[in-house]
């Protein structure tokens, strides 16, 4: 490789292959620079440091599996920088220190003609459309083929082309119009997951291509985009509409030093051309080849045998869309075999052998009509944006969350503002940004309520209990003096207790009609009075009363959770129940005792104390107790060890030697929790014979799978 200014001695040449193991043992050997260092010694150290930094870069940015802490990495980086400052002649263009700002500011990007044009893709929007695309390809070949397909996520970013000569990155360009793009090499070089030098990560002896052009998508992770927008807002600067815009804006900076500060990332997915490398026959082989060469490839790409498998893989991306840290707007389906791709060719600029399965749109522009202020049981007063109705992906949207007042200020929101809103999944959409350039001058400021819209008490601003820095607006009254707080508390209590018949509207109505003054009254609802209500039938009344009766037997942890004590969530409610076994014990405990429970903390302990010492709360609790609600848990008789505590199991298929219920009991006795469906929170799936979709899902999510033999071992010791 031409990167070295000085020849290395033979010893270090031989060490090349074993260096990874060596570094892994001593990953952090950064050292102070000796005063009397000779240039030769410095050169050795510089090479060594670059080698280590490159390796840790790969672990961090490509494998997502760092071996050293950020601080340790920084120490190595600083040492290299210091050495290069002392011996500037040792600086090479490919030193990791040069990623930060290579190339200097340009006034215009040089043009690049793509020798292999950068393609566009045809779109399909449904399984039917996909089948039609497939049928067209078959027809074109005039023969029934059993195609294989790859299914990849369609990243919503910017396509780039990277050219390597003899394994060295020589050029990076934008897509442009597909024929001509911009040379943005210095900017792309700042992206740490783009390798500057290619080498086989599996130590293969195969030749490095003399010429290799790959294509990929540069994007900004969603988390990074949100952080960047928050920073821009704090500085009063213009926000980016979405991660794609922020990636584009960052990539097209005339000063690469600015690009370097933006957390861009890349997925590589296309082999445009190659000379002098291994023979690759399929897209699947190409993807594996990219990984071996140290490129970053999108996760969970599937190789599918038929359209049915393709549809499943596509659905899997749709389902996961909201959980990813990168935006996808579809899946890309490619016929796997290059030989068939060549025969299929193109219609215009669209290849016949690939198509994009587009997902429903999730963004729209509309106008802010007004703000509704909603009081919740905690006293927080939350803004809801009322919108001019707009359709997003087939659903009409009329309102959007604003989370808190801080967001109104951060967005600089005014009534009548043109807004970009985004809807993810089935949840209520949120406001992304104000479309400043579409303002008309008709916009008016939003006035924060100075008094609670429910009780009229003055409002105050403070952070919420999550400890987040974003202040919320609060009513200064407590729920016993603020009707909407109490109504919301009644609704919350009923919902946690499993009383589904007490919907939000019914909870408000019962309060308004005087049937309930607080949550304790839930257990004293009278059938006659319910039936006397307008439009309240016998069926609804009996169902509701049955649910209320059933809720009395719920475990102590459920009651503690339902009370809505500040700082007490599901986990801490369980910890309290496990520790005290009864409400009476908890009420009698002091702050120190509560705070001494592992994982509890003093703030929560004080909050619990305050709650139980409040006279109004005591009156509510007295009502609950008098109604015969269960307030204690039996102490477990089976005091055996709980080796599976905290682990969630899901069972699927049939076990030969155990019934399903029996197997579940055996796991529960060892402290395990039994789940009904597989999610990423599942620790183990026990798969018996004829296991179905749960097993597939577990495999897709990478959940540990145990067979009957492993299960038997688990429950024996
Ligand atoms: Zn109030």
Image (cartoon, helix red, strand yellow):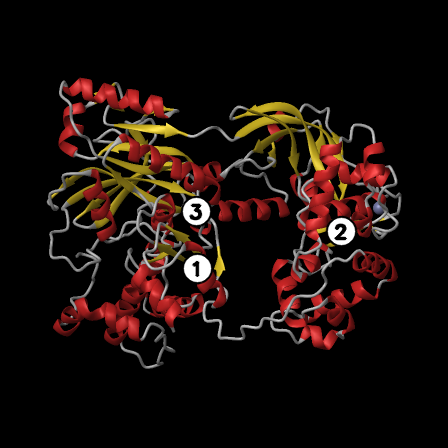
Whether tag 3 and tag 1 are in contact, CB under 8 A, the answer is: no
Q: Is residue 94 above or below residue 604?
A: above
Q: Earlier in the sequence, mark 3 or mark 2?
A: 3
Image quarter where the C terminus lies is bottom left
Q: Is residue 239 above or below residue 673?
A: above
- Per the image, label 1 sits on a secondary structure element best described as helix
Disc 3 versus disc 1: nearer the observer: 1
**Dot label at residue 259:** 3
Label 1, on which residue? Answer: 662
- Per the image, label 2 sits on a secondary structure element best described as loop
Label 2, on which residue? Answer: 378
State the separation of the CA atoms marked 3 and 2. Answer: 43 Å
Q: Earlier in the sequence, mark 3 or mark 1?
A: 3
Image x and y of residue 336, in percent: 20, 35
Q: Residues within 10 Å of mark 1 (few under 14, many from 20)?
A: few
Give the side of residue 165 with respect to residue 266, left or right.
left
Give the side of residue 394 with respect to residue 174, left or right.
right
Viewer can see residue 455: yes
Disc 3 versus disc 2: nearer the observer: 2
Whether tag 3 and tag 2 are in contact, CB under 8 A, the answer is: no
- Per the image, label 3 sits on a secondary structure element best described as helix
Write the residue at 43% across / 65% down. Answer: 70
């Amino acid at each position: 490789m031409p990167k070295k200014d000085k020849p290395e001695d033979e010893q270090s040449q031989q060490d090349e292959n074993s260096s990874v193991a060596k570094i892994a043992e001593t990953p952090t050997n950064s050292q102070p620079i000796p005063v009397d260092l000779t240039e030769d010694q410095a050169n050795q150290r510089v090479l060594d440091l670059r080698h280590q930094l490159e390796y840790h870069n790969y672990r961090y940015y490509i494998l997502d599996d760092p071996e050293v802490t950020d601080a340790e990495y920084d120490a190595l980086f600083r040492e290299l920088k210091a050495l290069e400052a002392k011996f500037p002649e040792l600086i090479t263009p490919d030193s990791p220190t040069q990623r930060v700002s290579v190339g200097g500011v340009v006034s215009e990007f040089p043009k690049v003609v793509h020798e292999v044009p950068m393609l566009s893709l045809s779109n399909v929007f449904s399984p039917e459309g996909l089948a039609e695309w497939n049928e067209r390809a078959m027809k074109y070949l005039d023969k029934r083929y059993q195609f294989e397909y790859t299914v990849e996520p369609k990243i919503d970013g910017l396509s780039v082309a990277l050219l390597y000569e003899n394994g060295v990155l020589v050029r990076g360009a934008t897509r442009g119009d597909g024929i001509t793009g911009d040379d943005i090499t210095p900017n792309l070089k700042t992206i740490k997951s783009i390798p500057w030098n290619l080498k086989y990560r599996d130590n293969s002896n195969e030749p490095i291509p003399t010429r290799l052009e790959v294509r990929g998508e540069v994007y900004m992770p969603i988390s990074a985009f949100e952080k960047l927008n928050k920073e821009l807002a704090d500085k009063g600067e213009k926000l980016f509409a979405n991660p794609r815009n922020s990636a584009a804006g960052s990539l097209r900076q005339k000063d690469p030093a600015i690009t370097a500060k933006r957390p861009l990332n890349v997925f590589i997915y296309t082999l445009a051309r190659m000379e002098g490398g291994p023979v690759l026959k399929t897209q699947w082989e190409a993807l594996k080849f990219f990984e071996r060469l140290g490129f970053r490839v999108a996760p969970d790409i599937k190789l599918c045998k038929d359209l049915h498998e393709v549809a499943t893989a596509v659905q899997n991306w749709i389902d996961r869309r909201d959980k990813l840290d990168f935006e996808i707007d579809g899946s890309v389906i490619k016929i796997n075999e290059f030989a068939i791709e060549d025969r299929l060719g193109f219609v215009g600029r669209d290849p016949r052998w690939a198509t994009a399965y587009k997902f429903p749109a999730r963004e729209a522009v509309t106008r802010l009509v007004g703000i509704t202020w909603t009081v919740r049981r905690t006293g927080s007063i939350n803004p809801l944006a009322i919108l001019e109705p707009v359709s997003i992906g087939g659903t009409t949207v009329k309102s959007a969350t604003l989370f808190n007042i801080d967001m109104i200020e951060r967005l600089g929101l005014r009534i009548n503002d043109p807004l970009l809103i985004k809807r993810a999944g089935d949840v209520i959409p949120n406001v992304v940004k104000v479309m400043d350039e579409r303002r008309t001058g008709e916009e008016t400021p939003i006035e924060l309520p100075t008094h609670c819209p429910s009780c009229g008490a003055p409002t105050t601003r403070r952070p919420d209990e999550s400890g987040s820095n974003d202040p919320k607006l609060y009513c200064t009254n407590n729920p016993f003096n603020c009707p909407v707080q109490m109504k919301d508390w009644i609704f919350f209590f009923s919902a946690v207790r499993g009383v589904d018949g007490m919907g939000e509207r019914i909870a408000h109505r019962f309060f308004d009609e005087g049937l309930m003054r607080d949550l304790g009254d839930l257990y004293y609802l009278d059938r006659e009075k319910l039936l006397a209500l307008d439009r309240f039938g016998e069926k609804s009344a009996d169902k509701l009363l049955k649910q209320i009766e059933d809720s009395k037997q719920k475990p102590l942890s459920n009651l503690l959770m339902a009370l809505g004590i500040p700082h007490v969530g599901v986990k801490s409610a369980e910890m309290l129940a496990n520790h005290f076994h009864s409400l009476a014990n908890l009420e009698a405990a002091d702050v120190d005792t509560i705070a001494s429970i592992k994982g509890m903390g003093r703030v929560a302990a004080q909050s619990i104390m305050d709650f139980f010492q409040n006279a109004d709360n005591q009156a509510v609790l007295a009502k609950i107790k008098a109604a015969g609600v269960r307030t204690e848990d039996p102490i477990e008789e089976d005091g055996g060890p709980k080796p599976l505590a905290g682990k969630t199991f899901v069972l699927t298929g049939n076990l030969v030697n155990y019934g399903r219920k029996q197997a579940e009991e055996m796991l529960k006795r060892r402290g395990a929790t039994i789940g009904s469906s597989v999610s990423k929170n599942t620790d183990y799936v026990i798969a018996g014979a004829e296991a179905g979709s749960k097993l597939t899902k577990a495999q897709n999510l990478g959940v540990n799978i145990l067979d009957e033999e492993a299960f038997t071992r688990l429950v024996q010791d």
